[in-house]
Image (tube, rainbow, N blue to C red):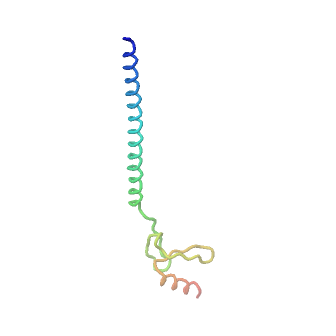
Amino acid sequence: MPGLGCFYDIGLIMIRLLLSVLLLLLLSAILRYLIKDIFTQRKKLNRDFEPEELIQDPYCQTYIPKRTAVRKRVGGKEYYFCNKECLKKFLEKKAS
């Protein structure tokens, strides 16, 4: 039975080849996951350094970041103030 050893060797080679392919697929999936995570973290970091939109307080004329401003809709128009005191003075001035 000299031919059976040949089939056994081919079977081992096929199993090794199949395991190698599966290992490569697993490694590529892990690398893609890690690389994707690195790029999304970079995008988040870049957003932190984007300039903020500044708006002018209509009462005291100072510029403030829009995200921290006190907002008030007056007469259908939205106004942004640096603090509640400026809002109060603005409303008083507008009423008189």
Q: Eyeballing the image, is 4 above or below 49?
A: above
| Relative depth, front residue between 86 and 47 | 47
The location of residue 21, given as percent across then percent down, is 40, 31
Which x, y percent locates residue 32?
A: 41, 43
Query: Residue at the right extreme?
Result: 76
Q: Residue furthest front?
A: 1
Q: Quadrant of the C terminus?
A: bottom right
- Where residue 90 appears, as percent x and y from the top left, is 53, 83
In the rendered image, which quarter contains the N terminus? Answer: top left
* Residue furthest top in the image: 2
Q: Quadrant of residue 72?
A: bottom right
Residue at image position (38%, 50%) is 38
Which picture quadrant has residue 3?
A: top left
Residue 37 against residue 18 in the figure, above or below: below
Count the marks.
0
Foreground residue, 68 or 28? 28
Image point (60%, 73%), residue name = 77
With respect to residue 8, does 46 lie above or below?
A: below
User: Quick check: 12 left or right of 90?
Assistant: left
Residue at (41, 47) in percent of width and height: 36
Relative to 49, is 88 on the left or the right? right
Position of residue 67 measured from the top left corner of the image (x, y, whole percent): 47, 69
